[in-house]
Amino acid sequence: MTSNPVRMQAITSVEAYTPPPFTFDPGEEPGEVFGENVFSLTVMQKRLPKSVYKSVVSTIEKSTPLDPAVADAVASAMKDWALEKGATHYAHVFYPLTGLTAEKHDSFLDPVGDGTALASFSGKTLVQGEPDASSFPNGGLRNTFEARGYTGWDVMSPAYVLENPNGNTLCIPTIFISMTGEALDHKTPVLRSQQAMSAQAKRILTLFGHDDPENVVAYCGPEQEYFLVDSHFFLARPDLLNAGRTLFGAKPPKGQEFDDHYFGAIPERVLGFMMDTERELFKLGIPAKTRHNEVAPGQFEVAPMFERANEASDHQQLLMTTFKAVAKKHGMECLFHEKPFAGVNGSGKHVNFSIGNSELGSLLVPGDSPHENAQFLVFCAAVIRAVHLYGGLLRASVASASNDHRLGANEAPPAIISIFLGEQLADVFDQIAKGGATGSKEKGTLMIGVDTLPTLSKDPGDRNRTSPFAFTGNRFEFRAPGSNQTVAAPMVVLNTIMAEALDYCASSIESAVAEGTGFDEAVQALLSTIVADHGTVIFNGNGYSEEWPIEAEQRGLKNLRTTVDALPELISSEAIELFSKYGVFNEREMHSRYEIGCEQYVLSVGVEANLTLEIGTTTILPAALRYQTELAQNVVALEAAGVTADTSSLTAVTEQITALRAGLADLASAVGHEHDEDLHVTARFCRDSVLPAMAAVRAAADELEGLVADDLWSLPTYQEMLYIL
């Protein structure tokens, strides 16, 4: 147990934790609350005129243009429903390029001439809002003095009432654009890319005999990893408070070596938090499905069911907000940083991706005989082409200073974007490359050797957690996204590169058939060409091995190790042509995202560098100097008494103090370096000079943590933060 008064007080407070009052009605069924705060289709059907309801449904399910005439009726019904739910205000919710959620609240009440107020909410107000756009990141799309921005109602994502002890608010998901119509948010490009992908996917379905197919949508199921830390420890760590990760911290005696936390029994306090968050998520229509302990101590995961990508993206942002709020209620902080603690696994947000529609289901389901499922093979081949050609863009979509601490660290997939197909599909495509697939490896059964156990089916292929883009039976799992980012960015890239690949596939088949080639032969020729041209992106081996980067380079696959390496992919001529062709981004919008990516990288590293200087100078160095003084005084006292003193501890502490001071001086010099006008040049300097200087400071500080007397060390330790909950 620590003898430092600051840490001791924190531990005492943790031990005295009292759970919040029981908030669950024992008779309440989870299904009863699901979606109760959502202005869902069921609610609309009850409250809207039949013609209005049909018009809205047609827009949501068939992507028909929204009829402006229905807005007033929807607004009136939405207002009445929200007032009944206790809402006093409404808010256009949008997703600026900060990566966070933004809200602009307005009261329902308007004054009238007789001195009273009347609740009102018009269709015009529902459809369009006007928040100030001048203070949000825009990467040069707008000048500082050009403040006008517009929000626009996204009917595809349902409105909801967000409850708060201080009042309820009707929240309306919206896009956020500039006065020039350019995207200042993450939602607008999701919708644009979705539309582009659907148009090309429908061409493929038409070729396979589906007359007038429904719109194809992208589905997303993001798995969210996170850490929980008691609030008393969190508030005693300025680095966690300001940067979301620990900039100092020696490895604890026990980390995750035993794998005993993974899928272990969920601690009582954490389970209370999970049940509370799930209830709040259910009320908001967010289909949380799975919960469990993750690999690192103090780390957990929640996984929702699949939803349309646009709605899943909105829900993911709302989930993070909910987790943060409920954690505080339970006396904890929820950490979404990709690497809050060094030496243990970081957190990701695996994006499970598929495409399909309500008529045909998922188009990435191989069936029992994938070699005979030509339609599936074409869609799967399109994924192979897309990932091979645009792996750099996928890497750029998950690029951030925080995610750089995780990717390629043998706990997450490498920064090399490759595809894992599994044994069955790899074999099918290998047959295609050799002239045509004639069979598929079948599912088997597991021989357990216990008569009383049921027969368990065995998948025809294993899973590969070292792959950044892995086929998992009926979808692809993109494992590279970071836990703190929006899933919108990778979904925009996935939709757009799939639009290009499906366009290529459809054009190839159409051209061949027009020239007299039989349909089956045209499909076989297409598949063979894709395997020959893009098969090098398929890798079923160990992505953590030392040999893989060498082999990947020989295959021509990019290894974009850091954000600074990856961001230029956004402004390559190929990327600009791609996004422009399919109407997702224009060249200015691409450059804006590149500029914002560079700026956020520089700002993130800058904040951490200043924190490192502050904590190192005002907390760690003084503690080390006090201990050095104590040791020196002890040596003097012993020698005065005629006793030979052991000076090894004093020598070790002195050496690390010298290293710490040198590191702080180097870091101060790096922080004071004048920034270049070119943000990418500054970002490179941050990567190559500032981060190494921070690492040197940390190395000395972490050594000192293991040397300095415990009563002098005031920062809560890893052992305390990860295990006392």
Image: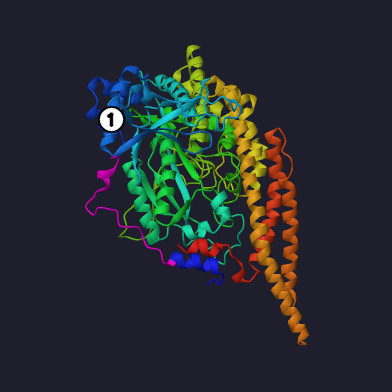
**Of 628 and 308, the residue lying toward us:** 628
Q: Which residue is mark 1?
A: 116
Rendering coords of residue 142 (x, y %): 58, 25
**Of 22 and 543, the residue lying toward us:** 22
Q: Residue at coordinates 24% horizontally, 54% vertically from top-left? A: 26
Dominant secondary-structure state across the stretch colored magenta: loop
Give the amino acid at mark 1: Thr
**Of 614 and 450, the residue lying toward us:** 614
Q: Is residue 276 visible?
A: yes
Q: Residue at coordinates 37% horizontally, 57% vertically from top-left? A: 271
Q: Residue at coordinates 37% horizontally, 41% vertically from top-left? A: 305
Q: Relative to residue 94, is residue 422 depicted above or below?
A: below
Rendering coords of residue 366 (x, y %): 41, 35
Q: Relative to residue 10, is residue 524 depicted above or below?
A: above
* Placement of the C terminus among the 4 image quadrants: bottom left
Horizontal arrangement in the rendering, residue 302 relative to residue 478 (left or right): left
Queried whether the magenta region covers residue 22, the answer comes back as: yes
**Of 423 and 153, the residue lying toward us:** 153
What span is in magenta? Answer: 15-36
The quarter of the picture where residue 578 lies is: top right
- Which residue sits furthest front? 114
Q: Is residue 162 visible?
A: no
Mark 1 Cα-neighbour bin, 10 Å: few <14, some 14–19, many ≥20: few
Horizontal arrangement in the rendering, residue 23 relative to residue 181 (left or right): left
Queried whether the magenta region covers residue 483, the answer comes back as: no
